[in-house]
Image (cartoon, rainbow, N blue to C red):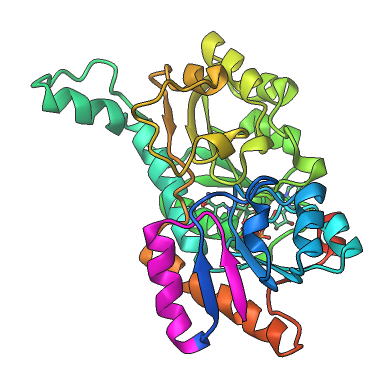
Amino acid sequence: MRVAVFSTKPYDREFLASANEIAGHDLTFYEPRLTVQTSALAAGFPAVCAFVNDQLDAQVLLSLARQGVRLIAMRCAGFNNVDLRSAGQLNLTVARVPAYSPHAVAEHTVALILALNRKVHKAYNRVREGNFALDGLMGFDLLGRTAGIIGTGKIGAVVARILHGFGCKLLAHDVVENPEIKALGAEYVPANDLFAAADVITLHCPLVPSTYHLIDEEALVRMKRGAMLINTSRGALIDTKAVIRALKSGRLGSLGLDVYEEEGDLFYQDLSNHVIQDDVFSRILTFPNVIVTGHQAFFTHEAMQAIARQTLQNITAFERGERPPGLVTVEKVVAC
Ligand code: NAD
């Protein structure tokens, strides 16, 4: 099947081309993000392959459908950037990769927790400058601390297992309870109770209308003074401006982000010679107790292989008139 692949970097091309040796599709790689302006590049392609920051709103989907696109194959787990209702109305099939390596994201989450706690980002710079002083580098033992996990699906469950290994007490919050988490001794509690009791709060639920700005002023006020907040899920789970206020006042002790609500204009590009225009993001970067990575939690060899393979499997199934294994339906969004 002819596929227009948007937002591609050399590593995307490498993994997709390698998996395609078996799948045998006709892939055309485009570097630009999919937007209204670039949607014309999909003319003549029955399938489009897109990523986390591609724009798949009603306007873009209409443009794609008018050009003959019938399949949107997301090469990621999240699909919050796809207007599923419009896709349904336009008879566009949407597929994603629901599970590739929950370990990749979970391990990155724990990397952020450990680095923030033990101030690895500061220690790294200090030692390189010959400064071996320890002032300001003190952390805490994770043993016995309370970790609050919001969203205990595939990734949240792996995070729970790792933190259980550190000897953390686990609190969980989800709309569905996961028996695997309960077997670890985790207690499911309402979100407000989790906010009040957790030393480390980590977000692993999808971005849907009910989770938009889940971490807002009110949630932050309920948190323990000095709590650590980690978000490797989707940026808009957090009200960034409220988080900045909480960091300024010291109410929030530290913040680890792999995602940011306005990341689309920033991430996956080298902007080191540009002046960043996003003042909220720039402010976030000024805090010593904040670590930001650029949506890289998924980025392991194993995950990239699995993403490429499963994306192409979705395309193959669609081409054969079968149900793609990663089919996304409107009901899926409503259910969340
Ligand atoms: P999953 O579907 O297995 O788990 C999500 C969990 O969130 C489910 O248990 C679901 O019941 C729960 N949930 C839904 N609505 C909720 C709500 N209102 N409150 C609390 N919990 C709720 O998904 P997953 O594979 O674990 O992925 C989780 C998220 O991680 C994805 O939605 C995606 O946005 C993000 N992600 C990020 C990266 C990255 O590179 N940073 C990579 C993959 C996935």
Quadrant location of the C terminus in the rendered image: bottom right
Residue at point 71%, 90% (across, down) = 320
Q: Position of residue 226 (x, y in %)?
A: 51, 21
Q: Is residue 9 above or below residue 258?
A: below
The image shows residue 2 at horizontal and vertical percentages of 61, 77
Q: Image point 18% across, 23% down: which residue?
A: 126
Q: Is residue 182 left or right of residue 159?
A: right
Point out the quarter of the image occupied by ligand 1: bottom right
What is the tally of numbered marks visible in this picture?
0
List x then y, in percent, for residue 277: 52, 20
Which residue appears at 48% of the width and 40% of the height?
Answer: 267
Q: Which residues are magenta?
A: 1-22
159 vs 186, nearest the viewer: 159
Q: Which quarter of the rendered picture does the N terminus lie within?
A: bottom right
Q: Is residue 13 above or below residue 242?
A: below
Residue most extreme to the top:
249
